[in-house]
Image (cartoon, rainbow, N blue to C red):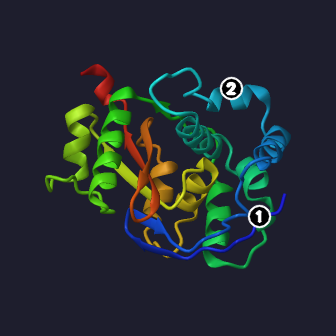
Amino acid sequence: MKKIFFINTAISVLLLFTTGCADIFGGFFEDDDAILQKDIDKYYTKEQQDKANTAKDVSYISDEEKKVIFFCNLARLDGQAYVNAMLGDLKNSDDYYVYSLVQTLDTIKDLPMYYPNEQLCKAAEVHANDLKSTGDFRHESADGSQYYKRIQKYYKGKNTSENLAGGFDDAYMIVNILLLDQYTPSYGHRKNILSRKFSRIGVAIREHPVYTYICVQDFSDDAGDKN
């Protein structure tokens, strides 16, 4: 499976959007989904895939949003397997950010799975719809409030964070752009996806008037489950 590394991004901490990219990691469009699944089957057992597919039976998000959670969980479950299955043609790249990602994923094993939460998905949906209506690309809500205040309105976790990715509605693209975190010295997006602090996630993918698509990921611990 050929994955072409070409990316042109504008990024700030915990904020990423992609422009002018016709092909990132080769992309997975149309029939390539089957090729990707073969690679996942090669490096992850059925039991591992079932464990990672925590959003399989929920009804409040789309299939592609479920895949976002699934791919995040595959990375958390076994980082080395993720490199082989999802980034195989890139793992020997001399690009600094690819090298950094491979090195990071090599240390990841058996992190807790992300479980979808309907309230967090609602928080993500509200923000994605706001960004769709305003054409903005930012973490602040339309009323000017910070992302954590918006999340707290829906889910009262103790630790929260948020990722934004623009330009694609394809889960493979979304997750790998955020994991790569090119030109983001803090690796904030990557750290959110691989954080031990979080175990709950909300995802929303919506159309966007400027960046074509926007994906919002909202993260939290499980403290809100008790509220």
**Residue for badge 1:** 3
Left or right of 23, for residue 55: left
Asked if 151 appears above or below 182 in the picture, the reply is: above
Q: Which amino acid does label 2 sit on?
A: Asp
Asked if 36 appears above or below 208 in the picture, the reply is: above
- Which element type, helix, strand or loop, lies under badge 1? loop
Q: Residue 30: x, y in percent? A: 74, 48
> For the residues marked 2 and 1, what is the alpha-carbon distance in whole angstroms?
25 Å
- Residue at image location 72% in from the left, 53% down from the top: 28
Q: Are marks 2 and 1 in contact (CB under 8 Å)?
A: no
- Residue at image location 56% in from the left, 35% down from the top: 66
Q: Residue 207: x, y in percent? A: 44, 51
In the image, which disc is placed on residue 115?
A: none
- Residue at image location 55% in from the left, 76% down from the top: 8
- Which element type, helix, strand or loop, lies under badge 2? helix
| Quarter of the C terminus within the rendering | top left
Q: Residue 84: x, y in percent? A: 79, 53
Q: Earlier in the sequence, mark 2 or mark 1?
A: 1
Q: Which amino acid does label 1 sit on?
A: Lys
